[in-house]
Amino acid sequence: MQKIVYDFDCASVLITGGASGLGLATAQRLLSSNANVVIADYSERGEQIAIDLNKQVNASNAKCAFIKTDVTKEEDIKRAVDYTTSSFGSIDGLVCSAGIGGANCAIADETLNNWNKVNAVDYTGVMLCDKYAIEQMLKQGKGGSIVNLASMFGLVAVPANVAYSGAKGGVVNMTRAAGTAYADKGIRVNCVCPGVIDTPLVPKEAKDFYAGLHPMKRIGKPEEVASLITFLLSDDAKFITGTSISIDGGYVAV
């Protein structure tokens, strides 16, 4: 089956966690779809990644830039939104891909330190990114699209990691709230809930185990999630907002 090709006409998209994993796969897909991309990542490797991506761009005008960003710091998030706007004239899309897993703790074993660390990145960081992107989109007056990254474990519980499950569940419901609050302004907010995806975060020795959890008996590919995110950012999804879509090989369906 042929891949759908989009033309974002040099719209600008900010991607947190864009230097690796799902964020990087999404950056590559968007650049090939003629979107300008700003990678916002804690890792300084993002600067070289942006340089390398610019060399690989097939679309004639699309560009990639980098800004070092810690999503646990409100000032960093605001600066990343401002940088996107000043670099490309506007912020038209946002992908909140930065995230951590934290320690595997059932609730009786949870520590406040781990809870706060996970929620600062996976929940509060997403909220602040959405807040400042929407604030700028409202000023621009031409709408926009946001995709938050949750998890299949935001839809069903993972008893052994209460902080991660709680944070991702919060992102799902926050997406509903944000996606309906500004729907009449043309600002859409949606959420994708991946299963286990083949990224550097998944140890090689655990891949077979994780594959067995999914009815498809495999783990997902980063480009599969990137394709869904790209669709949700595009005008093909302009009547979709406030929803969370599983991309998990059938995990939450059984």
Image: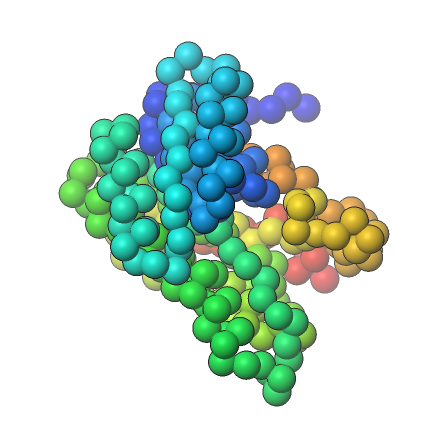
Q: Is residue 231 left or right of residue 2?
A: left
Q: Is residue 188 left or right of residue 203?
A: left
- Say which residue appears at 27% left-offset and 38% top-offset: 83
The N terminus - image quarter: top right
Q: Nearer the viewer, residue 85 or 52?
A: 52
Colour scheme in the image?
rainbow
Q: Nearer the viewer, residue 51 or 190?
A: 51
Most distant residue in the bottom direction:
108
The C terminus - image quarter: bottom right
Q: Nearer the viewer, residue 168 or 181?
A: 168
Residue 210 in view in this figure: yes
Where is residue 127 drawn, in percent x and y?
A: 36, 59
Q: Is residue 28 above or below residue 71?
A: above
- Say which residue appears at 30% left-offset and 40% top-offset: 144
Q: Is residue 115 left or right of residue 215?
A: left
Where is residue 235 drawn, in percent x and y?
A: 39, 32
Where is residue 40 drawn, in percent x and y?
A: 41, 43
